[in-house]
C-alpha cells in the first residue's frame, strides 16, 4: 500500500474515531478543543487546579452513556470497524486517564456497560490493552528503562507460559509517550522535550511517575478482573497470566532518583499505590487459577520464579501466595523423587547412561557417555546435573556431602580412568579460556580436593593402626598421579589445604613418610614442575612440601617399604634442589647426605660388567632400587632394559618353507620383572619404561623376548590409571606407518588378545578397539594368502564382542553395512542375545537402534537360527529372526548344480598323481562358485579315508585363497556333509559309521594336517544345531584325544593362567607347532602367546550355550569337566559363569550348575561360607530354603563393599572401624561374605574389573545357583526389608546411641506417631541375627536400614525377569495387606497421615524408629527401578495392575508414589511413557471415575498435588528433560490425557481441562495451535 492509499484509509477512519472520542470526552469531562500545550502551561498549584475543575461543565450522567452510544452506533454502517475503533479509543483513554479516579471509574463503567450488550470483544481488547500498557511504560524515556525491562521481560527469564502474539492491530491514540498525558489530569505536566534522565530528576518527580504507573497497572487489573466475569479464550488467559506474573516478579525494578546503591532497594518501601496494584495483580492471579474455573492451571505458577523474587515486599497477601507455591511445589516435587535415599551415589557395579537430554551428542563420544554418578534435585524434583550445577553446590550442604561420599567411595573402589574423566571438572587454574562446559562433570575441584585429602587422612589412620595397607597406598598413588596429570587438582592449592588439614585438624596422624612418598610420585608431572618453577608461591609451597617429612619408625627396617619411606625424603630434597637451588636454606642437610648413600649403593651394584639380577634381589636391594627409581630414573630404566636384553640374541628360522635369508634376530628369553618389584617403582620410571619398551617392541629390528612383552603387559596392569594408552592409536601417533611393518600388527594384536583384553573393558575402550580391529579384518578378508593376522584379529574381535556388557553398534559411524565376517555376524547376534537377556537394553535410543543394527548384520549373513536357539533368545531378537528364510536348501541346490564340476576339479587337484601345473590354472581361472565348494568336494572324495587325497595340494590351494573364501568353504562344507549324512542314511548306512567317518574327515582338516582353522569349523558345526547330527559331531570332536592333547600342550607351554604372577622363564613355541600348517605357511615372525588351541577360548563357551539350548546337559557337563583347566585361561570366565546362569535360569540342573561354578577359582571368589552347602543337596527337589541370615549376609556384603558408606567425614572414622575392614569376621552361618583383606589392584580382579562388581556379581551367582524358586528368594529378601528397622534396633542393643548422621534429614518437629502405633500389631521379626552386622557397619541402625534397602534393590535389579514379576507380586500383596489399609476403623485423617508419613520421606520414619512396611517397600521398588535398564521397565506396570482396583485416595497416592519417579526416566521412551501415564490416569478413574462410589467422599482439592504432578511430567516428557520456559506437552500426550479425563468426575475433569488438545479449553493447545494442528 503506497502513501496515498494509507492517507485515504486514515481519512475514512477518522470520522468514526473523532465521533467516539468526542463522546467519551463528553462523559469524561474533557474539553476536546483543549490543546495539550495548554495543560502543560497550567501552574502546578492545587488551588488553580481545583478552580479550573469547578469552572468546567459537568459531564452527563453515566446512565445516559449507553443511550448516547446507541445513537452514535446507528450513524455508521460498518459496525465491526466501529467496534474496533471503540476498543482502540478505550485503550488509549485507559492509558491517559488512569491517574484520574473519576475518569478511570467512568471508563470501568463504560466497559461494563458495553460488555453487557456484548459489544466488547475481550479476546481482542485485553491483549491490546496489555500491550499498550507495556508500550506506555516502555516509552517513558531513560527514567523508566527499568520499568520497560520489567514490562517486556521475555518469558525465558521467568519460566512462565508464553503465548503467540495475539495483540490487536490497534494503535495508541498518541504515538508519543502517553505518560505526559497521564500527568495532565490533575498532575503537574512535564514538557515532552524536557530531559528525563535519572540524574536530572528529583525524587518527587520520580515518585509521581511511579504513582502514575501504579495507577495504570491498578486500572488495568480492574479491567481484567471485570473481563474474567465473562467467557474468554484460553489464549487470552495465558496472555493475562503472563503479564501479571511479569509485573509481580519485577515489581521493584525501577529507578529511584537520588538513591545510590547503598540505600537503594533496602531503604525503599512500597507505598500504598504499589501495594494496591500488587493486590489487584494477586486478585487476578487467584481468579485465573481458582479451582472452580481453572482458567490457568496452578502448575503454571509453580514453574515460574515468583517465589524467588528478590526484595519481597512486606505484604501478607503476596507472602501467602509464595507460601502456597512452596507448599504445592514441594508436594509435587515429592512425586518426582525416589524414596531411595542414596540413589545417585554410584555403586560402580552397574552401567548407567546419560538421560534423554544429552542423546543428541554426535559421534563416538555419545556411545560411551554414561549417566552421571550423582544428580542434584531441582526445586521441581527433576534430576539435574552438570558443571554449572556442580559449581553452585555449597560446601557443607546435603548435596555436597553426597558428592563427597561418591568420590570417597571411588577412591576405595578404583573405577576406571574413563569414569574419572567424565565426572570431574578441571581445576580453575588449568581451564582454557572459553572452554565449553563438560556435559557429565558433576564434581568440582573443591570436592575432589577435599575427598583426596580425606582419603590421605584415612590411609594415614590405617597405617598408624598397624594395618598393612601398602596396597591401598599404591592404588591411591596411581589415581592421584592420574588426577594431577589430568589437571583435576591444583597442586599449589592442594598442598596448602593438605598442610592446613594435617597441622590444624589432624596434626597427630602424620607419623610416617607416606605423604612425602605420595608427593614424590607426582613431582615430575608437568603441571607440578610448572608450579614449582613459575608460581609466585613456589617458595612457600616448597617449604610446605618439605614439612611433611617424618623420621621412619618401622619395626622392620630392612623391609622394602620401610627402606623406601626412610629414603624418600632424601629423594624429594634432591629433586627439589635440582629444580630450585634457592631452596637450599630450607632443605634438610641430613637428608641431602642420605642422598650420597643412595649414590654409593647404586655405584656398588652397577659397577663393572656384572648385570643386576632382579630375580635374586633381597628385600634391602629391592627397597634401595625403589629409592633409585625416584632419584635416577634414566639409569634405572636403562638397567631394567639391560636386564631384559642381557641374555643376548639368536637367529630364529621359523620353518622349512622360509628361505635362510629371511631369518629373524630374536632376543633370548629371560625372566620378566616380577610384579612385586614393579609395583614399588616410581610412576615416572614406569612411564619411561613403557615408552622404552614400546620402542623396543615395535620399532626395533630385533624381535623382542616374551619376557619383555610380558613385562610391558604387567606395567599396563599395575598402573591402569597412569599408563593406559589405546595401543593402536598410540602407535599410529608415534609413526603412522608403524602398523604396516611386518610383525608390528601381529605383536600388537597378540598383546591385546592374550594380555590386555580385560584392561580395555575396564577402561571402557572395548568398543573403540573393536572398531579398530574391524578395520584390519575388512582390509584383509579379501586379500589372498594373508591368513595369520586375519584369523588372529578375528579371534580378538570375537573376544571383544563377547566381552561387551551393553548395547553396541557394529559400525563406529552407525550407518552402512557391517564389515564383520560371517562368523562375527553370528557371534554378534549371540552376544546381543546374552546382553539383552541378562542385562537388558539400557536406553530407549538403543531400542530404536537395535533394529538398524540387526538389518546391518542380517543383510550380510546367510545364517538361519534354529528354533531351539530362538526359544531362549529374548523376544526382541526372536521376532526379528524367526521369520528369516532358511537358505540351506538353496546352498544344497547350489552344491548339486556344481557338484560334478567341483568333484572333477578336486580329482585333478588332489589325486596322488595330480598335474603340478593344474594348481596355478585352478587358482587363476576357477570361478568363485566353484572355489567356495572346494572343501566340500575334498570331503566327498575322502569317503572316510582322508589318505585318499593329496593333502599337500589341498593345503596349498587353501593358503592361496583369501580368508573370506576359506570361511565360506567351511560353512559350505558343513552344509554339504550334513546333507550327505541324511542321504546316506536313506540308503541304509549306519548312523554311527557315518558320524565316525565325518569325524575322521574333519579331524584330517583340523589337526591331522591342520588345513582349516578349527575354531571356525567348530562354530560352523555348532551353528547348525537345527540338524540332529551337527552337535553329535561337535561333541565327538571335543572328546577326541588329539584335541585334548593339543589343549594340554598349550596349558603346559603357556604357564599358569595368572601370567602376571609367573616368575619363571617363558618358552617360545615354534611357529608351526603353535599355529599349524595353514596359518604358519611362509610366516616368518615368531609367536609370543598365540596358539591355535587358544583360539578355542571364546568358542567352547558358545558350544556350551548351544548344547544347553538343545537339552544336551550331560555332554555340556562332560565338556566343562574336560576343559575346565583350559577355561582357566579364559580372560572373562567369571563373566561367562554369571551370564550363563542368568541366561538359562530355571533351566539348568543342579549338577550342571555346580560344574559351571567349578570353572571359577573358587578360592578367589568371595562366596558366602554356607553357599557350597546350599547348592550341594543330594535331592534338589526337597532342598530347603536358606535361612534369613544367609540372605541378610548377602545384603550386608553389598552394603559393605558396593554402596558408598555413610561415613561423611574421614575424621569420624575410628582406627578400630578401619582395622575391622581388614580383618576377617568370626565364622558363622551369617558371616559377611565379600569381606576383602584390603583394596584390590586391578590385576588381581581383571574380570569383572572392580571389587564392587565382583561382590555384586558374586551375590547374583549365588542366588542364581540356589535350588529354590524365585518366589521364595524374593519373599525372603523382601521380608528382610519390611522388618529391617525393628530387627536392627533390637539387635543394636544400644550400640549406636549417637545422633543420626547429617546425611539424613531430621524428622519434622511435632510429628506424632500415635495414629501410626495405635492398634498396630507387633511386626514379626525377619529371623535375622544382625548384632554382628550393626556393630561392624559403623552406622546407626537407622542408617544401616536405608543402605540395606538400597542394597536389596540393587541386587534384585541384576537378576533375570523371573525375579521381577515375583517382586511385583510380593510388593503389591504386602501393600494391600498393610494394617492401616485393611483396618476399617481408621479415620480418613489417620489414613492420610499414615500415607504421608510413610511416603513423603521414609528417613523421617527411619530416624524415629517407626518405619512402615509400605515406606520400606516403596523405597525398595525405587531402588530397584533406578538400577533397571530401560527395556526391563516395561514390566513395572504389573505392580499397579496387582493393586487395582484402587478404592481410596491413600492407595491412589501409593500408586503415584511408586510409579511417579519412573516417568522421568521414560521421557525419551514415548511409547512406554504413554503406557505408564495411561496406567496412572486409570488409577485416578478407579477412585474419581464417573461411576465410582468411594466409601468416603473426597474433594478434588485433596489431590491437587497429583494434578500438579501430571502437568509437570507431561511438560518434562515434551521437553525430553528438565522443564524449560518454552516446554510444551506433546500432542499425543494431550490427546491421551483428554481421553482419560472423559471418564473422570466433572470436578476432577475440570482440573485436567488444560491437558487436552482442545483449543477452546486448553491454554497449551491454544498457545501452541500449530502443534495441535500437526497432530491432527
Image (cartoon, rainbow, N blue to C red):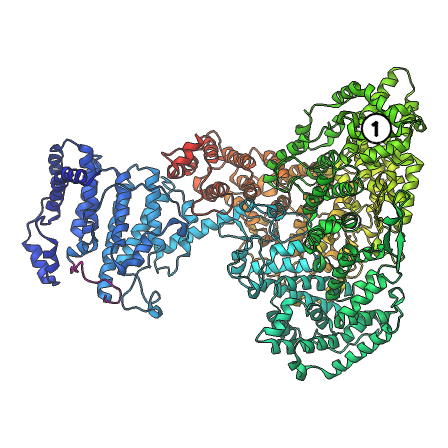
Magenta-span inclusion, residue 931: no
| Residue 1230 in view in this figure | yes
Residue 331 horizontal/vertical position (percent): 49, 48
Quadrant of the rendered structure where residue 946 is?
A: top right
Q: Residue at x 82, y 53 (%)?
A: 1228
Residue under circle 1? Answer: 935
Please determine whether, in this image, residue 422 is positioned above or below residue 1372: below
> 420 or 898: which is nearer to us?
898
**The N terminus, quarter of image:** top left
Whole-percent x, y for residue 814 in the image? 62, 39
Give SS at disc 1. helix
Residue 795 coordinates in the image, percent (x, y): 78, 41
Q: Is residue 946 above or below residue 232?
A: above
- Magenta range: 187-201
Q: Quadrant of the C terminus?
A: top left
Vertical comparison of 589 with 156: above or below: below
Q: Is residue 1196 visible?
A: no
Amino acid at each position: 500500500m503506497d502513501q496515498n492509499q494509507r492517507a485515504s484509509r486514515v481519512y475514512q477512519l477518522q470520522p468514526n474515531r473523532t465521533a467516539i472520542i468526542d463522546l467519551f470526552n463528553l462523559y469524561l469531562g474533557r474539553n476536546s478543543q483543549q490543546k495539550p500545550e495548554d495543560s502543560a502551561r497550567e501552574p502546578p498549584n492545587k488551588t488553580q487546579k481545583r478552580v479550573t475543575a469547578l469552572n468546567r461543565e459537568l459531564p452527563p450522567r453515566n446512565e445516559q452513556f449507553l443511550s448516547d452510544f446507541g445513537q452514535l452506533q446507528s450513524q455508521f454502517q460498518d459496525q465491526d470497524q466501529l467496534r474496533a475503533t471503540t476498543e482502540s479509543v478505550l485503550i488509549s483513554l485507559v492509558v491517559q486517564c488512569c491517574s484520574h479516579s473519576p475518569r478511570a471509574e467512568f471508563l470501568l463503567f463504560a466497559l461494563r456497560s458495553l460488555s453487557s450488550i456484548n459489544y466488547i470483544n475481550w479476546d481482542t481488547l485485553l491483549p491490546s490493552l496489555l500491550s499498550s500498557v507495556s508500550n506506555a511504560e516502555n516509552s517513558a524515556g531513560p527514567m523508566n528503562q527499568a520499568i520497560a525491562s520489567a514490562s517486556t521481560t521475555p518469558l525465558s527469564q521467568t519460566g512462565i507460559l508464553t503465548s503467540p502474539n495475539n495483540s490487536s492491530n490497534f494503535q495508541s491514540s498518541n504515538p508519543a509517550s502517553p505518560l505526559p498525558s497521564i500527568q495532565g489530569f490533575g498532575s503537574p505536566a512535564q514538557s515532552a522535550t524536557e530531559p528525563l534522565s535519572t540524574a536530572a530528576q528529583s525524587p518527587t518527580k520520580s515518585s509521581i511517575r511511579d504513582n502514575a504507573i501504579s495507577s495504570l497497572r491498578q486500572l488495568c487489573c480492574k479491567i481484567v478482573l471485570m473481563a474474567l466475569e465473562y467467557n474468554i479464550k484460553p489464549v487470552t488467559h495465558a496472555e493475562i497470566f503472563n503479564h501479571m506474573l511479569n509485573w509481580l516478579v519485577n515489581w521493584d525494578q525501577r529507578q529511584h532518583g537520588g538513591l545510590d546503591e547503598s540505600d537503594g532497594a533496602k531503604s525503599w518501601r512500597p507505598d500504598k499505590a504499589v501495594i494496591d496494584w500488587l493486590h489487584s495483580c494477586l486478585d487476578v492471579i487467584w481468579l485465573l487459577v481458582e479451582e472452580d474455573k481453572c482458567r490457568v492451571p496452578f502448575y503454571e505458577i509453580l514453574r515460574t520464579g515468583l517465589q524467588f523474587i528478590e526484595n519481597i515486599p512486606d505484604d501478607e497477601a503476596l507472602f501467602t501466595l509464595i507460601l502456597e507455591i512452596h507448599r504445592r511445589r514441594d508436594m509435587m516435587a515429592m512425586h518426582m523423587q525416589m524414596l531411595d535415599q542414596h540413589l545417585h551415589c554410584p555403586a560402580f557395579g552397574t552401567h548407567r547412561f546419560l538421560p534423554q537430554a544429552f542423546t543428541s551428542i554426535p559421534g563416538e563420544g555419545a556411545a560411551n557417555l554414561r549417566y552421571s554418578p550423582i544428580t542434584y534435585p531441582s526445586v521441581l524434583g527433576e534430576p539435574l546435573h552438570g558443571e554449572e550445577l556442580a559449581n553452585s553446590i555449597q560446601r557443607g550442604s546435603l548435596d555436597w556431602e553426597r558428592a563427597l561420599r561418591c568420590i570417597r567411595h571411588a577412591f576405595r573402589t578404583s573405577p576406571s580412568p574413563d569414569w574419572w574423566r567424565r565426572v570431574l571438572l578441571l581445576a580453575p587454574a588449568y581451564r582454557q579460556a572459553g572452554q565449553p562446559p563438560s556435559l557429565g562433570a558433576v564434581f568440582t575441584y573443591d570436592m575432589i580436593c577435599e575427598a583426596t585429602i580425606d582419603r590421605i587422612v584415612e590411609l594415614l589412620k590405617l597405617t598408624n593402626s598397624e594395618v598393612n595397607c601398602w596396597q591401598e597406598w599404591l592404588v591411591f598413588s596411581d589415581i592421584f598421579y592420574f588426577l594431577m596429570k589430568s589437571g583435576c587438582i591444583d597442586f599449589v592449592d592442594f598442598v596448602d589445604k593438605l598442610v592446613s588439614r594435617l597441622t590444624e585438624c589432624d596434626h597427630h596422624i602424620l607419623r610416617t613418610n607416606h605423604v612425602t612418598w605420595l608427593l614424590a610420585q607426582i613431582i615430575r608431572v608437568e603441571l607440578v614442575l610448572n608450579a614449582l618453577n613459575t608460581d609466585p608461591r613456589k617458595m612457600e609451597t616448597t617449604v610446605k612440601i618439605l614439612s611433611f617429612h617424618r623420621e621412619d619408625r618401622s619395626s622392620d627396617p630392612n623391609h622394602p617399604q620401610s627402606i623406601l619411606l626412610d629414603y624418600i625424603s632424601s629423594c624429594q630434597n634432591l629433586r627439589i634442589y635440582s629444580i630450585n637451588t634457592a631452596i637450599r636454606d630450607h632443605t634438610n642437610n641430613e637428608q641431602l647426605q642420605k642422598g650420597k648413600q643412595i649414590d654409593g649403593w647404586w655405584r656398588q651394584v652397577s659397577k663393572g660388567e656384572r648385570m643386576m639380577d632382579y630375580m635374586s634381589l633381597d628385600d634391602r636391594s629391592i627397597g634401595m632400587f625403589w629409592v633409585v627409581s625416584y632419584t635416577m630414573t634414566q639409569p634405572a630404566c636403562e638397567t631394567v632394559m639391560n636386564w631384559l636384553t642381557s641374555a643376548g640374541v639368536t637367529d630364529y628360522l621359523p620353518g622349512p618353507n622360509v628361505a635362510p635369508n629371511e631369518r629373524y634376530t630374536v632376543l633370548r628369553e629371560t625372566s620378566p620383572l616380577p610384579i612385586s618389584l614393579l609395583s614399588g617403582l616410581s610412576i615416572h620410571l614406569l612411564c619411561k619404561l613403557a615408552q622404552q619398551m614400546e620402542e623396543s617392541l615395535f620399532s626395533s629390528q630385533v624381535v623382542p623376548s616374551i619376557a619383555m612383552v610380558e613385562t610391558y603387559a604387567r606395567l599396563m596392569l599395575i598402573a591402569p590409571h597412569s599408563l593406559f594408552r589405546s595401543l593402536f592409536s598410540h602407535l599410529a601417533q608415534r609413526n603412522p606407518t608403524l602398523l604396516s611393518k611386518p610383525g608390528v600388527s601381529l605383536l600388537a594384536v597378540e598383546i591385546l588378545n592374550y594380555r590386555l583384553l580385560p584392561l580395555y573393558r575396564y577402561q571402557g575402550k572395548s568398543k573403540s578397539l573393536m572398531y579398530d580391529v574391524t578395520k584390519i579384518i575388512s582390509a584383509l578378508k579379501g586379500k589372498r594368502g594373508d591368513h595369520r593376522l586375519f584369523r588372529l584379529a578375528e579371534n580378538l574381535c570375537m573376544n571383544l564382542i563377547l566381552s561387551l556388557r551393553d548395547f553396541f553398534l557394529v559400525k563406529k559411524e552407525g550407518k552402512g553395512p557391517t564389515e564383520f565376517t560371517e562368523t562375527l555376524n553370528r557371534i554378534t547376534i549371540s552376544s546381543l542375545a546374552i546382553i539383552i537377556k541378562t542385562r537388558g537394553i539400557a536406553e530407549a535410543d538403543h531400542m530404536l537402534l537395535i533394529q538398524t543394527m540387526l538389518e546391518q548384520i542380517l543383510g550380510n549373513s546367510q545364517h538361519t537360527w534354529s528354533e531351539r536357539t530362538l526359544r531362549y533368545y529374548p523376544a526382541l531378537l526372536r521376532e526379528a529372526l524367526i521369520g528369516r528364510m532358511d537358505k540351506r536348501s538353496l546352498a544344497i541346490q547350489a552344491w548339486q548344480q556344481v557338484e560334478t564340476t567341483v568333484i572333477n576339479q578336486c580329482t585333478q587337484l588332489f589325486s596322488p598323481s595330480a598335474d603340478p601345473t593344474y594348481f596355478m590354472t585352478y587358482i587363476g581361472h576357477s570361478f568363485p562358485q566353484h572355489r567356495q565348494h572346494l572343501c566340500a568336494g575334498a570331503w566327498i572324495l575322502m569317503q572316510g579315508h582322508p589318505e585318499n587325497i593329496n593333502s599337500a595340494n589341498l593345503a596349498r590351494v587353501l593358503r592361496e585363497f583369501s580368508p573370506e573364501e576359506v570361511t565360506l568353504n567351511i560353512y559350505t562344507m558343513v552344509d554339504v556333509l550334513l546333507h550327505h549324512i541324511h542321504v546316506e542314511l536313506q540308503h541304509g548306512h549306519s548312523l554311527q559309521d557315518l558320524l565316525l567317518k565325518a569325524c575322521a574327515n574333519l579331524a584330517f582338516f583340523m589337526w591331522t594336517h591342520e588345513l582349516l582353522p578349527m575354531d571356525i569349523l567348530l562354530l560352523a558345526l555348532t551353528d547348525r544345531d537345527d540338524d540332529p547330527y551337527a552337535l553329535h559331531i561337535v561333541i565327538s570332536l571335543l572328546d577326541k584325544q588329539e584335541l585334548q592333547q593339543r589343549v594340554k600342550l598349550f596349558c603346559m607351554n603357556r604357564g599358569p593362567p595368572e601370567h602376571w604372577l609367573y616368575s619363571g622363564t617363558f618358552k617360545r613355541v615354534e611357529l608351526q607347532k603353535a599355529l599349524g600348517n595353514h596359518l604358519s605357511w611362509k610366516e616368518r615372525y615368531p609367536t609370543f602367546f598365540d596358539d591355535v588351541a587358544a583360539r578355542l577360548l571364546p568358542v567352547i563357551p558358545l558350544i556350551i550355550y548351544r548344547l544347553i539350548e538343545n537339552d544336551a546337559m550331560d555332554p555340556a557337563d562332560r565338556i566343562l569337566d574336560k576343559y575346565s583347566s583350559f577355561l582357566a585361561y579364559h580372560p572373562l570366565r567369571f563373566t561367562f559363569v554369571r551370564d550363563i546362569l542368568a541366561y538359562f535360569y530355571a533351566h539348568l540342573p543342579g549338577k550342571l550348575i555346580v560344574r559351571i561354578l567349578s570353572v571359577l577359582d573358587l578360592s578367589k571368589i568371595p562366596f558366602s561360607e554356607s553357599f557350597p552347602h546350599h547348592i550341594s543337596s543330594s535331592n534338589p527337589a526337597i532342598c530347603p530354603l536358606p535361612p534369613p541370615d544367609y540372605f541378610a549376609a548377602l545384603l550386608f556384603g553389598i552394603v559393605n563393599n558396593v554402596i558408598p558408606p555413610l561415613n561423611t567425614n574421614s575424621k569420624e572414622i575410628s582406627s578400630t572401624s578401619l582395622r575391622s575392614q581388614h580383618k576377617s569376621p568370626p565364622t558363622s552361618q551369617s558371616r559377611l561374605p565379600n569381606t576383602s583383606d584390603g583394596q584390590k589392584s586391578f590385576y588381581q580382579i581383571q574380570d569383572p574389573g572392580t571389587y564392587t562388581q565382583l561382590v555384586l556379581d558374586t551375590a547374583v551367582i549365588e542366588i542364581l545357583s540356589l535350588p529354590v524358586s524365585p518366589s521364595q528368594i524374593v519373599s525372603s529378601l523382601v521380608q528382610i526389608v519390611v522388618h529391617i528397622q525393628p530387627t536392627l534396633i533390637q539387635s543394636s542393643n544400644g550400640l549406636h546411641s549417637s545422633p543420626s548422621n547429617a546425611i539424613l534429614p531430621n524428622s519434622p518437629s511435632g510429628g506424632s506417631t500415635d495414629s501410626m502405633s495405635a492398634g498396630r500389631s507387633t511386626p514379626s521379626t525377619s529371623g535375622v541375627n544382625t548384632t554382628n552386622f550393626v556393630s561392624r557397619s559403623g552406622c546407626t541402625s537407622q542408617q544401616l536400614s536405608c543402605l540395606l534397602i538400597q542394597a536389596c534393590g540393587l541386587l534384585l535389579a541384576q537378576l533375570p525377569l523371573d525375579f521381577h514379576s515375583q517382586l511385583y507380586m510380593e510388593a503389591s500383596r504386602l501393600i494391600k495387606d498393610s494394617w492401616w489399609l485393611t483396618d476399617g476403623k481408621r479415620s480418613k485423617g489417620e489414613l492420610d497421615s499414615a500415607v504421608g508419613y510413610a511416603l513423603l520421606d521414609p528417613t523421617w520414619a527411619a530416624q524415629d524408629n517407626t518405619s512402615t512396611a509400605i515406606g520400606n517397600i516403596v523405597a525398595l521398588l525405587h531402588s530397584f527401578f533406578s538400577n533397571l535398564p530401560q527395556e526391563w521397565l516395561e514390566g513395572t506396570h504389573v505392580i499397579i495392575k496387582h493393586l487395582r482396583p484402587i478404592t481410596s485416595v491413600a492407595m491412589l497416592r501409593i500408586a503415584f508414589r511408586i510409579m511417579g519417579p519412573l516417568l522421568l526416566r521414560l521421557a525419551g521412551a514415548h511409547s512406554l511413557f504413554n503406557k505408564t501415564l495411561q496406567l496412572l490416569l486409570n488409577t485416578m478413574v478407579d477412585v474419581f471415575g464417573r461411576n465410582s462410589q468411594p466409601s468416603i467422599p473426597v474433594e478434588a482439592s485433596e489431590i491437587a498435588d497429583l494434578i500438579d504432578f501430571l502437568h509437570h511430567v507431561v511438560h518434562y516428557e515434551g521437553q525430553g528433560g528438565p522443564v524449560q520456559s518454552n516446554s510444551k506437552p506433546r500432542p499425543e500426550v494431550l490427546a491421551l490425557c483428554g481421553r482419560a479425563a472423559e471418564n473422570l468426575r466433572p470436578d476432577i475433569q475440570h482440573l485436567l481441562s488444560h491437558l487436552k488438545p482442545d483449543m477452546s479449553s486448553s491454554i497449551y493447545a491454544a498457545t501452541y495451535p500449530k502443534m495441535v494442528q500437526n497432530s491432527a
